[in-house]
Image (spheres, rainbow, N blue to C red):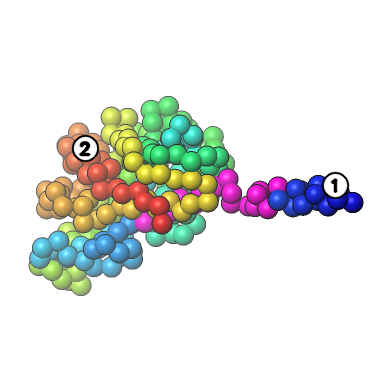
Amino acid sequence: MKRLSFAGLLCLLLLAGCRPGDNEVTVEFQWIQNGVPYTQSTPFFKGDTAIAVDLFHFYVSDLRAGDELLSDVLFVDPSDSALSAYTLDLQRKADEISFGLGVPSDMNAMDPTSFETTHPLSSAFAMYWTWASKYRFLKAEGRFNAGGDLSNAATNGGIIWHTGTDALYRTRTFDVSVRPGDRLVVKIDLDLLLGNVSLANDGFTHTTVDTYSTAEKISNEAIAAIEVVVE
């Protein structure tokens, strides 16, 4: 009886050590403005200029904790809880997080019609440029008004940033310790993103030759505006 009781206790301990979530990590993407989560289309200011971001979609690729691959590609929409929070397998503690903003060249050459509609690279997410046979890496749209009043649509300027091409794929590594069961938050700071950008000069790009310099600037500023923390 004593041996049976001990064996039973051991089984219970093993079961308790295998609770759901013990080998997982939650990865949440947030857009941040003035230090707090941003609400889609809410006006904010850069100096005297009023700004509202109405859409902000992007790809995150080769997401890793140390050398462990968490996901090959994710589609992110910070305004949609279903597309901004992911539960991913994580088997062991790691001391750094790394990923790419956009998709690497091998993925960029893929056919979106070859994927199921739920796959991030499918045409259902409207991130594929048919004319270029490539994916958009970042698709951001919004409005700005140098006079500070977005209610006057006639005087608003538009923000359209559609970046892509293999040369604009950006990667970054973050010194963040993460372990199974943690909640990892990836924060995109809109103030940092916009800090070095002149909306009057760099408010539009489709990554064509005439606006390629804007696409390059936005790609650089976007990856630099990201912070990764465990909360």
Q: Which residue is mark 2?
A: 216
Q: Secondary structure at mark 1?
A: helix
Q: Which residue is mark 1?
A: 3
Circle number at residue 133: none
Q: Is residue 191 left or right of residue 122?
A: left
Residue 21 horizontal/vertical position (percent): 59, 51
Q: Nearer the viewer, residue 131 or 99?
A: 99
Cα gap from disc 1 to disc 2, whole angstroms: 68 Å
Mark 2: which amino acid? Answer: Glu
Residue 138 horizontal/vertical position (percent): 32, 45
Query: Which quadrant of the view contains residue 53?
Result: bottom left
Q: Which residues are magenta?
A: 14-30
- Residue displayed at 77% across by 52% down: 9
Task: Spot the residue most to the front.
Answer: 2
- Residue displayed at 36% across by 56% down: 30
Magenta span includes 37? no
Q: Nearer the viewer, residue 55 or 8?
A: 8
Mark 1: which amino acid? Answer: Arg
- The reply to whether discs 1 and 2 touch (Cβ–Cβ < 8 Å) is no
Residue 212 horizontal/vertical position (percent): 20, 36
Task: Spot the residue most to the right.
Answer: 1
Q: Is residue 17 left or right of residue 185?
A: right
Q: Nearer the viewer, residue 68 or 107?
A: 68
Query: Which quadrant of the view contains residue 32?
Result: bottom left
Can residue 146 be seen here?
no
Picture quarter with the C terminus = bottom left
